[in-house]
Amino acid sequence: MLPFSYAFRNLLREPSRLAQKLVGSTLVVFLVLAAAAFNNGMSDLLKASGSPENVIFLGAGSEESVERSEIPVQSESMVKAGVRGIAERAGVAAVSGEVHYNGLLALPDGTTAQALTRGVTPAAFEVHRQARILEGDWPASGEVLVGALAHHVLGVEQEALAVGREVILEDQSFRVAGRFDAAGTVLESEIWFNRTDLRTLIQRDSLSCVVARLDDPSALARAELFAKQRLDLELVVVSEEEYYANLAGFYGPIRGMTWLTAVMVGIGAVMGGLNMLYAAFASRVRELATLQTLGFRRGAVLFSLIQESLLTQTVGFLIALTAATFLLDGLWIQFSMGTFRMELSPAVTLYGLLTAFLMGTAGTLPPAARCLGLPVPVALRAG
């Protein structure tokens, strides 16, 4: 085998060409890291938001969007009375009738942004048991409870939504009564209103949904039977896991576009890199033939060429990983359902490493095979 130092020295023979290879490698790996972090962050958020014990009663035809759903107010009490197997705690049934509204929120300083609001009662904590109040109290009339990540939605510092501050919806001010978190779910990006306040504000005489927590998996069938029997309510039942899985599918094209962008740029970089390698190896045909006349087999020469490429890709991967650490890691991304944090997890880093490895190996084989495929006498006479 050729010594490793031979491959290392060859990299430094043409600094300009080495710089071009590094730029292409860094760009491709950086885009793969960005796409993987984006997709994993969104998928993890939606996956964590669906509880296997919860079911959602929605209006028929609105299974894909709780915001468009409308069901009668009496549905809440009817679900409590008509569905067996609903969980209870301290004698309180885990049933929460809710109003979901995507509205334009504002702050006293003039900051405005679209945000998800939810009109709830204290029963919401019986259903969404991952939610807990961090500071402050349950909101009375004229007050709100803000999620731990709601300030990212509004694009302000956390202090702007501290207890005692104000938010404005539909030209009416509400005092922040407390803050809550919800174990990395979409709830953390929401602002919870007193249900009566929100219904009055948006002039709505119906609910968006009723969320119930079941203490027995078989109770889902009873919930579905209840919805089919009460034709007057026009209800459908969807498990919370299924609802958020459907949302993940809805956002699939967006996640696919991030991968497509990375792939398209990657293809362009790889094609440019192949042209560069063809030119680089073609200028070394005589050198490679000389190595073979000295007794080195073609496999050994090929392995040395792959070593050169892998060294370049490794440096490119490290540069891309460093750049992603400063530019992407910890970056908060907002979309219509909430806010998620991009993280360079081990899985995301592995995507980048595999990309660099594939470019360093598979990308080297075509030009190397063409140069090493020439008969040695012909290669020795090459100009």
Image (spheres, rainbow, N blue to C red):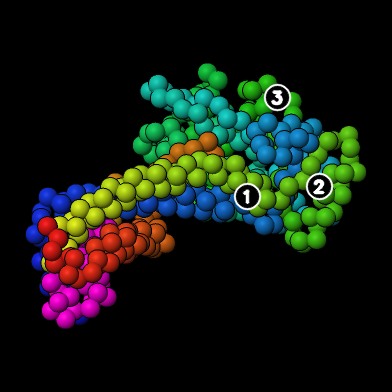
Residue found at x 73% / y 47%: 238
Residue found at x 57% / y 34%: 117
Mark positioned earlier in the residue sequence (3 or 2): 2
Q: Quadrant of residue 139?
A: top right
Q: Which residue is mark 1?
A: 245
Closest to the camera, between mark 1 and mark 2, is 1
Task: Determine which of the numbered discs, if any, sits on residue 80 in the image.
Answer: 2
Across and down, in percent, residue 142 comes to 57, 28
Looking at the picture, tell me which residue is in the foreground, 294 or 347: 294
Across and down, in percent, residue 105 comes to 50, 26
Which amino acid, mark 3? Arg
Q: Distance from label 3 to label 2 (Cα)? A: 22 Å
Q: Which residues are magenta?
A: 289-317
Q: From where the camera sits, is residue 174 visible?
A: yes
Looking at the picture, tell me which residue is in the foreground, 323 or 313: 313
**Mark 3: secondary structure:** loop
Residue 291: within the magenta?
A: yes
Across and down, in percent, residue 8 comes to 14, 67
Q: Quadrant of the N terminus?
A: bottom left
Q: Quadrant of the C terminus?
A: bottom left
Which amino acid, mark 1? Ala
Residue found at x 79% / y 55%: 220
- Mark 1 crowd level (few <14, some 14–19, many ≥20, 10 Å Cα): some
Q: Distance from label 1 to label 3 (Cα)? A: 28 Å
Q: Distance from label 1 to label 2 (Cα)? A: 26 Å
Task: Determine which of the numbered discs, if any, sits on residue 204 in the image.
Answer: 3
- Mark 3 crowd level (few <14, some 14–19, many ≥20, 10 Å Cα): few
**Mark 2: secondary structure:** helix
